[in-house]
Structures are given as structure tokens and as C-alpha cells.
């Protein structure tokens, strides 16, 4: 690694750390309904949303109606997106005359975007029209991100309020997140992206003759507006098949830097918002530290693997599936960040990473998307792990576990375990099924242990609502579209519902004041404990599978073997 | 029932706002401020579009600098990489054949170290760039194919120097050169 490469990494984390309190503080003001500078600019839009939809902004509800609203809203989004794809050819803005999408692919894609996953069994430029991409997919990019934040806000209110059933109003949380945070940031970001060369138009595909005289059909479309929100909302679904490796989607190193930054920005800043909302910024920074340590540890291992010589390719720099303008360091920084955050966009092909760098990406998915994770979902997933950690610590010292002054009891621990187990069950069971069935194995692009990695990665990506892929796997089959679709549903709502139950039950509890005997959750010891719990749970669950996939592949590669 | 109605209305509202108004607003601003970039950064030769600065092209002629190998042969419908894992025998064979081909095509020494992007396929299959080293290694072949004299060779070297893009803001990304622009510049050398 050269100094210039190191500077890029340091700059990236430096900017991320500096932006965290800035955006975090702003989001705190937005969520708590305080006046902020954007309420003068966009206050009318918030009010218009309430008026149009008939929402009583100050009417709060209990956790069950909050969850019901969220599920219903997401279900409507799913139905619309499904239908829109099924009748694509009759809809406007389809200059490439793309046909209607098959039922199984529409099902998969609709679930994928509704659950903030953005798993793509299709190639954007040859499957979906401009209309479906912008009024179908991009809308879900906004509202699925806002839904994730809404769940987080409900949980935070449950943790910070005393003896109340009320945990907020889903519709106002949804509206404020969209109007004040996602929308203005996306507009700014999209325009900067166009300035770097990302396309934004409604023109038909351009057929040209190259300098050598061959015909080349270049796809167009409103890409910048979609790419901005796909990064910000940790969605990750590319406008084009190659995602952010496509030169129209990520044309320069600067656009790359911003896209990488924006995929971590909101999840990182939310930790600060969280700290402010629970009344202790230290709590927020503690969580931030845990996430950052895990991210950087993964990054270091991946970089080491990518820069190491191996007997198969000798000392060649491993540029397979990587773009010249980004080089190795930006590709690996991206692959680690995008899998840590539940984003899933890529600027290099994950499938062609070294086995160890691919394994780190996979582990990031398997840990439950809590290393920054998706917007909202990363942090509420982390709180679930905090509950388990506090519980274990309580068992060790023999006291009733407490978090933020509230007692953690059997119900919360049960819910937390369900939220952790369900996605893991999806990964293990579906991967096992795919790797012994002919319809599972027929999708593989690579033989040997790497084939198993492709399957494992797919279900980890679905269950973690990430959306990135070892993209050699041909997943546009009935088997994969359906199993991955259900995997994404369980990975999303199998966590949201228990988390909402925790929010409801915590809200009704009393707060006990801190005393000398309180187990602190904002110091170095707790950071260590939390990291240990995360790694032990993830490790115990997935080590056997990982050892058969990427680990054994790494060993065989170092023995010079190919398949 | 009230919740159903609210859900439907707010979904409709957000579809209009984030699905129609937002992309139209961005398109409007983009088309006004950065019209060329928003429309694909096309390169015009004579009165015809000859490609996009951002989308790589395949060059097989010895008189043109070659682009990287591509899993989709520079056909953008759809873009994509090989998705071969490093232990995939097909990849190993592909890289070996690229090495041999690059060496014989450019009349290089058999032991020459080849810039790795010239034997590995890009992620998008449309990578418009190669490293300046990869361009310099092809220089001899181009000069021979075009029968360039010493003055013309100097001009060509000058082109490579001028078209080499340094890391952005001195620190971001890699040093690189755009193959299409380089070939267009080469065509202009008298």
C-alpha cells in the first residue's frame, strides 16, 4: 500500500467522523420536532403531506398500531411495485420497449426494494423502464429507508420515556425523515454526481458507431437521482447492472469518495442522534466506536488479503472485477463499507475478491448488518445486541440487567433472541437447501468452495437486507427469486416486529436512577464486551459454513489450486 | 380503516414527491447546469457521436491503443464483470492467454511485467481507462502500425503525458488514461 492509498482511507474515516455529530445533531432536531433551518424552507411540504393524507401530527400511538401502520404502508408499496413491473410495457417512459417483468422476478424485486435490500436478480438497463425505476424503485428507496428510521425512533422513545404506552406517530416519523433528511440531501448529492458525469435524462438509448466502427448501444436514463438515494438510504440497487462500477453510475474517484461516504453517513450520524435522544451523547459514541472498530478490523484484513501475492496469479495486482480509476484500495474500502452498512451497492465485483476479502464481506452480512448497518435498521439491530450483552453481563455479576435505567427482563431477552435468530435461520437453512438441490446448484458460476460461497453470500445478503451479491450466481430463477424473496421478508420484519415489541414493553417501564452499582454501558469495558458478544454469536452460528466456503478456498488458493 | 386510507394517501403523495417531482427537479437542474454530462459525456468526431468519454470501447486494430479485456466485450447491454473467483480455472486460463497475447501483439520481451489491468476484466466491462504504463507499453506497436517518424512519436508521447489523469485532487483514485480520447488524439497526429 502506498502513502497516497493510505491517505484516501484516512480521509474517508476523518470526514465520516466529522460529519457524524453535524448531521446527527440536525437529525435530532428533525425527529424531536424542534425548529431548525430546514423547517423554514420545507415546513410547508411537511404540512402539505399531513393535510393531503389526513394525518394528525401530534397524535401518538402504542407499539401495535405503530407497527400495523408500518406493515400496511410497506405492503401497499409492495403491491404497487409488483403490479407496476407486471404492466411495465403499457406504462410511459420506456424508450427501450422493455417487456413486462415475469411474476417471480417482480415478486423478488418488489420485496427487495420494499425491505431496503435492493437485491437485484435483474440487470437494470435491460429489464426495467425509466418509469419503473424512478416511480417504483426510487420511491421505495426513500420510504423503506424512512421506515427503518421510524422503527429506530419508536425504539428510542420506548427506551427514553417512562411508564407510557405511546411511542410516537409512524406517519410523522416517516414524513419528517423523507422531507427534511432524505429529500434535500438527495437533491444536493444528485446534482454533484451529475457534475462528475452521472447521466440524468429521459432520452432513448443512444446507438453509436465506435471509433473502430462497431455498433454500441449506450443506455441512458434518470440515473443520478436514483443513485443519490440508493447510497443515502443504504438501499444499494444500481440503475445499471454493474452498479457503482458502471462509469455512468460512478464516473470519477471523487464521485466514488462521495458515494462511499454517503452510504455510511446516515447510519453513522444516527448513533449521535441516538445518544442525544436517550440523554447521553456518550452512549451514542460508544455504539459508534463499536461499529468503527469492527469496520476497520474487517477493512485491514481485507486489504491485507488483496495486497498479498498468491501462487495462482503471482505478483499481479488483483484487478479482476475492479475498475482502473478506483484501484484496489477504493474497491476494498467500498466492499467492506457496503457490506457493513446494509447498502449493497458495489464498485467492484464481490465475486472476484480474494477469498478472505470476500469472507469479510460475508461476515459483515452475517453479523446481522449492525456495523453501521442500514439506516435505522443497523442501530436497532445493534440495540438488540446491547440487550443481549447487558443480559449476559447481568448474569455474570448477579444483578438484574439494566440498560439506560430500565430493567431488561425475560420478555425483552426473548424478543432480542428472536430478532437475532430469525435472519440466521434463513441463512443456514436456505443455503443448505440450495447447496444440495439441483435448482440451487444450477445457478453457480464458480466451481469448488467458491460455489458454496456464492450461495452463502446470496442468503446472507437477503437475510441481512444488504443486496450485494457474488453476482456470478444466476439468481433469476423461480427457486432463487422465491427463496431469496422470503429470506428478505424474514430478515426485515422478523427483526422489526420483535424490536417494536421491545420498544412497547420498555416504554411502560419505570426508570431507576443510576447508582454506584449500575453496570455502565458507555465505557471501554462495555465496548469490549459488546464486540465479543457480536463476534461470538456470529462466529458460533456461521463458522462451520464459512470454513467450508471462503476459508478452505483461501487455503487451496495458497496451495495453487484452481477448479 | 382510517389507517388504510392514510397509508394509501401518503403512499400516493410520496410517489408523486419522490418518484416524479424529485427526479424531474434534478433533471431540470442537471440539464441546465451540466447539459453535456447529464446526457452522457458524448464525444463528437466530425458531426457524428463516436462514443462516450465514460464508456470504454473495444479496439482490435494494432494502430489503436487497446482497452482492458471485458467480460461483455464492451457491449453495455448489460454491463458487468466476469464474476470469476480467483480459484476459477477459467480465470487462470484467461489471464494466461491475455498475457501471451499482450506480449506478442506488442512485440514485448517474454518476461516483461504487464500492468495487471490489461489481463484482468473490469467490474463494469466498460472501463474507459488503462494505466499510463499500459499505454506506454503499446507505444512501439502503434508507431510501427502507423509508420510514425521521430517527430510524430514525440507528439504521441506528448499526447500520453497530456491525457494522463492524475489522482483527483492529488489524492483520490488512481493515475489513468482514457483510451478513447487517447486514440482520437492519436488519429489527429499528422
Image (cartoon, rainbow, N blue to C red):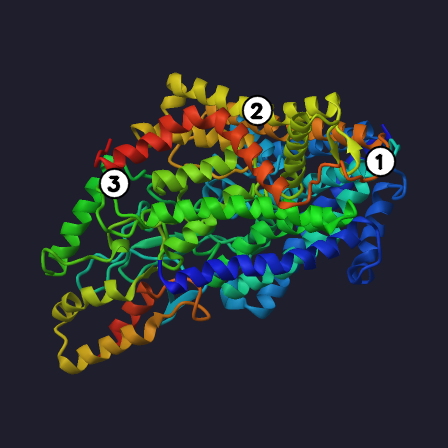
Left or right, B148 with reference to A378: left
Judge by depth and name the residue closer to the eye, A391 or B143. Answer: A391
Q: Contact, CB < 8 Å: mark 1 with mark 3?
A: no
Of the numbered discs in the image, which one, if any, rests on residue B91? 3
Tell me which chain the residue with mark 1 is part of: A
Q: Label 1's element? A: loop
Q: Label 2's element? A: helix
**Residue A433 x, y percent position in the rendering:** 45, 18
Q: In the picture, residue A373 is in which quadrant?
A: top right
Q: Which residue shows up at 28% across the image and 72% down it? A: B160
Tell me which chain the residue with mark 3 is part of: B
Q: Which residue shows up at 64% across the image and 35% down it? A: A381
Of the numbered discs in the image, which one, if any, rests on residue A511? 1
- Which image quarter holds the C terminus of chain A? top left
Left or right, A71 with reference to A44: left
Q: In the picture, residue A552 is in which quadrant?
A: top left
Q: Label 3's element? A: helix
Q: How far is the residue under mark 1 from the one under mark 3?
A: 61 Å
Q: Find disc 2 in the rendering and name its residue.
A: A486
Amino acid at each position: 500500500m502506498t502513502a497516497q492509498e493510505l491517505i484516501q482511507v484516512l480521509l474517508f474515516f476523518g470526514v465520516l467522523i466529522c460529519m457524524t455529530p453535524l448531521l446527527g445533531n440536525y437529525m435530532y432536531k428533525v425527529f424531536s420536532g424542534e425548529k431548525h433551518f430546514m423547517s423554514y424552507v420545507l415546513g410547508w411540504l411537511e404540512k402539505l403531506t399531513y393535510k393531503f393524507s389526513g394525518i394528525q401530527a401530534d397524535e401518538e400511538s402504542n407499539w401495535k398500531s405503530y407497527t400495523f401502520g408500518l406493515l400496511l404502508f410497506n405492503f401497499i408499496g409492495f403491491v404497487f411495485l409488483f403490479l407496476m413491473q407486471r404492466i411495465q410495457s403499457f406504462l410511459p417512459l420506456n424508450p427501450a420497449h422493455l417487456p413486462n417483468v415475469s411474476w417471480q422476478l417482480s415478486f423478488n424485486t418488489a420485496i427487495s426494494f420494499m425491505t431496503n435490500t435492493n437485491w437485484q436478480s435483474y440487470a437494470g438497463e435491460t429489464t426495467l423502464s425509466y418509469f419503473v425505476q424512478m416511480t417504483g424503485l426510487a420511491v421505495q428507496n426513500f420510504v423503506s429507508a424512512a421506515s427503518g428510521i421510524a422503527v429506530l425512533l419508536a425504539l428510542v422513545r420506548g427506551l427514553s420515556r417512562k411508564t407510557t404506552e405511546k411511542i410516537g406517530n409512524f406517519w410523522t416519523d416517516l414524513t419528517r425523515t423523507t422531507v427534511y433528511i432524505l429529500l434535500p440531501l438527495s437533491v444536493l448529492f444528485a446534482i454533484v454526481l451529475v457534475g462528475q458525469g452521472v447521466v440524468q435524462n429521459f432520452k432513448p438509448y443512444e446507438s453509436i458507431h465506435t471509433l473502430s466502427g462497431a455498433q454500441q448501444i449506450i443506455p441512458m436514463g434518470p440515473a443520478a437521482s436514483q443513485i443519490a438515494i440508493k447510497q443515502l438510504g443504504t438501499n444499494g440497487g444500481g440503475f445499471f447492472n454493474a452498479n457503482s462500477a458502471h462509469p455512468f453510475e460512478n464516473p470519477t474517484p471523487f464521485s466514488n469518495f462521495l458515494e462511499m461516504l454517503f452510504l455510511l453517513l446516515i447510519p453513522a450520524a444516527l448513533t449521535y442522534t441516538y445518544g442525544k435522544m436517550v440523554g447521553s451523547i456518550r452512549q451514542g459514541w460508544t455504539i459508534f466506536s463499536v461499529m468503527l472498530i469492527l469496520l476497520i478490523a474487517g477493512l485491514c484484513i481485507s486489504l491485507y488479503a488483496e495486497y498479498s501475492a498468491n501462487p495462482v496469479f503471482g505478483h499481479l495486482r488483483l484487478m479482476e472485477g475492479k475498475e482502473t480509476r478506483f484501484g484496489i484500495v477504493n474497491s476494498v474500502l467500498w466492499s467492506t463499507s457496503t457490506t457493513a452498512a446494509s447498502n449493497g451497492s458495489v464498485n467492484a465485483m464481490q465475486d472476484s475478491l480474494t477469498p478472505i476479502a470476500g469472507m469479510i464481506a460475508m461476515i459483515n452480512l452475517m453479523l446481522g448488518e449492525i456495523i453501521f448497518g442500514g439506516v435505522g435498521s443497523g442501530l436497532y439491530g445493534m440495540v438488540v445486541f446491547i440487550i443481549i450483552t447487558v443480559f449476559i453481563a447481568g448474569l455474570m455479576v448477579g444483578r438484574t440487567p439494566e440498560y439506560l435505567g430500565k430493567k431488561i427482563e425475560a420478555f425483552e431477552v426473548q424478543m432480542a433472541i428472536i430478532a437475532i435468530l430469525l435472519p440466521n435461520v434463513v441463512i443456514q437453512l436456505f443455503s443448505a437447501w440450495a447447496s444440495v438441490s439441483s435448482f440451487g446448484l444450477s445457478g453457480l458460476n464458480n466451481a469448488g468452495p467458491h460455489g458454496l460461497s456464492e450461495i452463502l453470500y446470496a442468503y446472507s445478503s437477503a437475510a441481512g437486507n444488504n443486496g450485494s451479491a457474488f453476482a456470478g450466481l444466476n439468481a433469476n430463477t423461480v427457486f432463487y427469486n422465491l427463496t431469496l424473496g422470503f429470506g428478505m421478508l424474514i430478515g426485515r420484519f422478523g427483526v422489526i416486529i420483535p424490536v417494536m415489541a421491545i420498544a412497547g414493553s420498555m416504554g411502560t417501564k419505570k426508570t431507576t436512577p443510576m447508582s454506584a452499582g449500575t453496570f455502565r454501558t458507555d465505557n471501554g469495558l462495555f465496548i469490549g464486551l459488546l464486540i465479543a458478544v457480536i463476534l461470538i454469536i456470529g462466529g458460533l452460528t456461521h463458522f462451520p459454513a464459512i470454513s467450508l466456503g471462503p476459508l478452505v478456498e483461501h487455503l487451496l488458493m495458497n496451495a495453487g489450486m484452481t477448479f | 380503516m382510517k389507517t388504510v386510507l392514510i397509508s394509501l394517501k401518503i403512499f400516493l403523495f410520496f410517489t408523486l414527491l419522490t418518484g416524479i417531482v424529485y427526479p424531474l427537479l434534478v433533471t431540470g437542474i442537471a440539464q441546465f447546469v451540466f447539459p453535456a454530462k447529464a446526457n452522457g459525456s458524448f464525444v463528437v468526431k466530425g458531426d457524428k457521436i463516436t462514443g462516450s468519454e465514460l464508456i470504454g470501447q473495444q479496439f482490435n486494430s494494432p494502430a489503436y491503443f487497446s482497452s482492458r479485456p471485458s467480460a461483455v466485450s464492451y457491449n453495455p447491454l448489460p454491463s458487468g464483470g466476469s464474476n470469476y473467483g480467483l480459484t476459477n480455472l477459467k480465470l487462470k486460463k484467461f489471464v494466461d492467454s491475455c498475457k501471451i497475447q499482450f506480449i506478442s501483439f506488442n512485440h514485448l520481451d517474454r518476461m516483461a511485467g504487464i500492468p495487471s489491468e490489461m489481463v484482468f476484466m473490469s467490474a463494469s466491462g466498460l472501463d474507459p481507462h488503462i494505466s499510463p504504463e499500459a499505454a506506454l507499453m503499446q507505444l512501439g506497436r502503434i508507431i510501427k502500425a502507423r509508420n510514425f517518424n521521430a517527430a510524430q512519436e514525440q507528439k504521441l508521447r506528448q499526447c500520453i503525458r497530456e491525457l494522463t489523469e492524475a489522482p483527483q485532487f492529488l489524492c483520490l483514485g488512481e493515475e489513468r488514461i482514457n483510451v478513447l480520447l487517447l486514440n482520437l488524439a492519436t488519429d489527429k497526429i499528422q
